[in-house]
Image (cartoon, coloured by chain):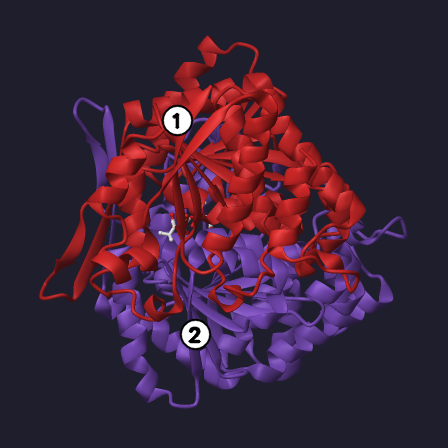
Chain colours: A red, B purple
């Protein structure tokens, strides 16, 4: 197969980890007889510096014309203490999600046996955890009308959901549950919010189309607790945008493998694949960043193309590297630490 | 001093744990020469059954005429799977918070050395944790306009905050920080929400009035992570209603002592004091519920009256009980388990 893939390296360590994912993806393409054409484009602070906005039209055109987007990380400290700055990297992210119709953010949290000790949780709590959040990504309070009134003394944000928005996200959740343990948890705050009641009634109405899936409904505050207590009691979870933002980040730290967690943002068409970690400007250019989350994001990309074997080849290489200690300093535990590039080279040559 | 205290036992184990808190409070009053008149009133499912609504006017009148409210727990499983039921115990809770002007929910999370092993977190992560959330409790998306349009196909919830609402909550935060380590963390999502930007700018403007307090600003998703990673890096945190709902519950499980965590809800005048645990209907009437969280809530009540010694007497009795193993079955670890009432009796006689 032939693919065009937009390459949005972004800020901080983004370019370095993206380079490794490109290398590994090319090795996979080589082995399985595919052809990838990479289409680099600007985003984040890098794009603000170059053209004055974080998600330029040109970048959008490149993404929209590609089969997928591979994304590094964005964000720069000079924007961090000025949330009201006119132009911010985050705006680019939100604009991109909306423009590409990426309504479903897929965020797995799983454990690697060799990394269990890194978890803040006790081993018996975290062992065997393998869950996936599907976070709605283009609706809710992120995109509702917001503003000020009474001369700036009152602020408001509107949270809005339509039944259709819930349905298309829930459909992906049911489908994913069917490929896994057939357990689906709908996370909401239906005891307080009208949007949550719409979520709950919509999902309830869809249950009959997936008779094999066992659906549970839990309040967001209860899930925030149980994720820490018994993370391995969850499998597939679906939720709205803001709850998903909070809970997926909470979930990401419990495994102890945050530096390894990939993600996908899917819509009807083009998917975007990115590590969940940030741009770590302090580490930029030092060849110390862990590229594995980005490499595993590339695995999700292949799998989303329906190329399961290709994805598996990447996952196996990563597992092997972890087992053999071919890791960056965040995972080397005082042993030998490899550079970002060296880990990438090793993975590519082990495909 | 003389106090009138409204006694809202509520549902499930509420009445049993409230009984113990009354007993211990009376012992304190006796010892320190105070006089408490208890004013029982209906709330929760119990009130729905008796008079058709969860926070009847009569109950409100009793609360409004009291110096404080001591609250057990509300909620009953028969309401749980019908979030759209016309009358629900939770509505009573929200109505009560608003009617009594309880805008600040104070939620401490601390550890007991003897209970550290109960935490899902590793000892080195949790040891020394002693933080307090101040959650805004009568504003935000809980109380904004909500409803449906497009024939029920679209749902909306409005999140609204005024500068004044932020100021009065933040003021309590700054004041609390001054009595502790002078560190205050403002939790928001100012990179996305206008209400959060109002929160942040309002708190920033108040910094000059508390020059000794070191204020940090963190996004809610980052706090959801760091609470699991390094809970002991926090001290006082202030946040809006919904973020507070999620984060205080997350925080409550990290200590391993959830069954012991008290809370206070404060306004300009009357305070409400309650354990953070639920009504555990399965345990109701069995004399097995742990009364310590309710007893410690009574300690917060005395402290809020300015009676520090009285509060301390209760805390010391609880510590002693924990050290001597005078505990209910949730904490007895296979050793001898005492009943709810027996723990209450022991605490009262050790004041
Ligand atoms: C940067 C921010 C706008 C973004 C979000 O809240 O969606 C981020 O936290 C994420 O989860 O991708
Ligand atoms: C029962 C519910 C309405 C309530 C809330 O969300 O405020 C509860 O979760 C709490 O935190 O006291």
Identify the residue position indicated by label 2 in the image. B216
Residue that extends furthest to the right in the rendered view of this protein: B335
| Residue at (62% x, 70% y) in the render | B232
Mark 2 falls within which chain? B
Whole-percent x and y of residue B23? 66, 64
Identify the residue position indicated by label 1 in the image. A169
| Residue at (37% x, 58% y) in the render | B137
Asked if A262 appears above or below A118 in the picture, the reply is: above
In the displayed structure image, the side of residue A26 where residue A75 appears, left or right = left
Is there CB contact under 8 Å for labels 2 and 1?
Answer: no
- Pick the front one: A247 or A3: A3
Mark 1 crowd level (few <14, some 14–19, many ≥20, 10 Å Cα): many
Kindly state the secondary structure of the residue where label 2 is placed: strand
Whole-percent x and y of residue A348? 63, 39
Whole-percent x and y of residue B162? 22, 63
Whole-percent x and y of residue A187? 47, 35
Q: Tell me, yes or no, if residue A132 can be seen here.
A: no
Kindly state the secondary structure of the residue where label 1 is placed: helix
Tell if the residue under mark 2 belongs to the same chain as the one under mark 1.
no
Asked if A151 appears above or below A265 in the picture, the reply is: below
Question: Quadrant location of residue A179?
Answer: top right
Residue that extends furthest to the bottom in the rendered view of this protein: B211
Mark 1 falls within which chain? A
């Amino acid at each position: 197969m032939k693919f065009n893939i937009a390459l949005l390296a972004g800020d901080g360590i983004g370019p370095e980890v993206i380079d490794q994912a490109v290398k590994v993806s090319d090795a996979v393409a080589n082995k399985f007889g595919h052809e990838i054409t990479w289409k680099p484009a600007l985003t984040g602070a890098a794009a603000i510096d170059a053209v004055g906005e974080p998600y330029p039209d040109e970048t959008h055109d490149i993404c929209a014309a590609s089969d997928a987007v591979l994304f590094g990380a964005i964000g720069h400290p000079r924007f961090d203490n000025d949330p009201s700055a006119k132009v911010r990297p985050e705006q680019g992210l939100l604009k991109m999600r909306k423009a590409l119709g990426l309504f479903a953010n897929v965020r797995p949290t799983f454990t690697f046996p060799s990394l269990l000790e890194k978890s803040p949780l006790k081993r018996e709590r975290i062992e065997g955890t393998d869950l996936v959040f599907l976070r709605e990504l283009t609706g809710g309070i992120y995109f509702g009308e917001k503003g000020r009134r009474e001369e700036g003394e009152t602020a408001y944000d509107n949270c809005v959901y339509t039944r259709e928005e819930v349905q298309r996200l829930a459909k992906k959740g049911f489908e994913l549950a069917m490929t896994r343990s057939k357990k689906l948890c709908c996370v909401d705050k239906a005891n307080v919010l009208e949007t949550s009641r719409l979520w709950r009634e919509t999902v309830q109405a869809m249950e009959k189309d997936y008779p094999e899936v066992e659906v549970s409904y839990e309040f967001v505050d209860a899930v925030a607790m149980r994720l820490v207590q018994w993370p391995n009691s969850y499998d597939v979870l679906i939720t709205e945008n803001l709850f998903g933002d909070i809970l997926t980040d909470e979930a990401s730290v419990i495994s102890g493998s945050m530096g390894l967690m990939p993600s996908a943002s899917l819509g009807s068409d083009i998917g975007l694949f990115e590590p969940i970690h940030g741009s770590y400007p302090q580490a930029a250019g030092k060849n110390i960043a862990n590229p594995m989350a980005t490499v595993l994001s590339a695995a999700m990309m292949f799998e989303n193309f329906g190329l399961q074997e290709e994805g598996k080849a990447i996952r196996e290489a990563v597992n092997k590297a972890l087992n053999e200690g071919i890791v960056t300093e965040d995972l080397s535990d005082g042993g030998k630490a490899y550079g970002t590039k060296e880990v990438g080279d090793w993975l590519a040559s082990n495909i």
